[in-house]
Structure formats: structure tokens, C-alpha cells
């Protein structure tokens, strides 16, 4: 997953990757209490939310990864690696 926070000058971006292939993308504006969270006339799925402020909460909260498979399917998941990178440790809660 790639997360780039929104600023006053640029939209925020969240991109999901699986095996180095981008599988989804969402963009948002910096939080504005007067702006709608979801652009009017869109459906309620993550791709069509792009452009509103619904994802702006990501810019002020800590993110965590959650791995899961469908309950009761008997399909285990083996994760052999996760790559994590960040531009700066300046805002880390624990260093």
C-alpha cells in the first residue's frame, strides 16, 4: 500500500498493491469541514469516493495493516514478506 497525505496544494493518494501490481487507488482532498465527504452523485465504493474528503482521516490517524481471509473458507493465507518504507521517522509514535 502506498499512502501520500493530502496537502493544501495536492490531493492525497492511497494505492493498494498485491505482488507489486496496483489493484486499487483512491484520492482525496485535504480535510475541509465545509466540503462533502463524498462527491455528490457517486456510489458508495472506495473507487468512486475519490475526490471528496472521506479519506482525509488517514492524514491524521495512524495506519495499520490487517491480513484476513474469508471466515470459514478453510483457505489459509501464507504471507512471505511485507515491504514497508516511509519518508521520515519524524512523526513516529514509537522510535
Image (cartoon, helix red, strand yellow):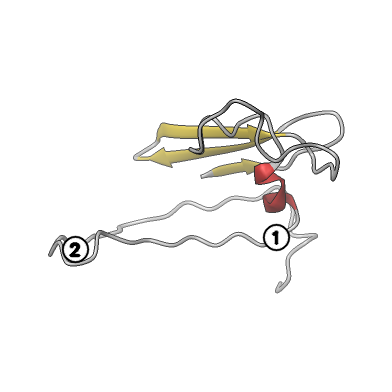
Question: Between 28 and 41, which is closer to the camera in this rendering?
Answer: 41
**Residue position marked by numbered label 2 in the rendering:** 76
Q: Residue at x 19, y 63 (%)?
A: 76
Cα distance, mark 1 to mark 2? 30 Å
Task: Report x, y in % for residue 67.
Answer: 37, 61
Q: Residue at x 70, y 52 (%)?
A: 57
Point out which mark residue 91 bears.
none
Q: In this view, does 68 lie above or below 31?
A: below
Q: In this view, does 32 lie to the left or right of 95?
A: right
**Residue position marked by numbered label 1 in the rendering:** 61
Q: Is residue 18 above or below residue 62?
A: above
Residue 30 in which image quadrant: top right
- Name the N-terminal-most of marks 1 and 2: 1
Q: In this view, does 76 lie to the left or right of 19?
A: left
Total marks shown come to 2
Q: Is residue 75 above or below residue 45?
A: below
Amino acid at each position: 500500500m502506498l499512502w501520500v497525505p493530502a496537502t493544501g496544494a495536492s490531493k492525497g493518494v492511497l494505492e493498494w498493491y498485491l505482488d507489486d501490481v496496483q489493484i486499487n487507488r483512491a484520492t482525496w482532498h485535504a480535510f475541509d469541514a465545509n466540503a462533502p465527504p463524498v462527491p455528490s452523485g457517486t456510489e458508495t465504493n472506495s473507487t468512486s469516493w475519490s475526490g471528496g474528503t472521506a479519506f482525509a482521516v488517514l492524514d491524521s490517524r495512524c495506519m495499520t495493516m490487517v491480513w484476513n481471509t474469508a471466515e470459514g473458507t478453510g483457505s489459509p493465507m501464507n504471507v512471505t514478506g511485507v515491504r514497508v518504507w516511509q519518508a521520515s521517522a519524524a512523526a513516529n509514535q514509537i522510535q
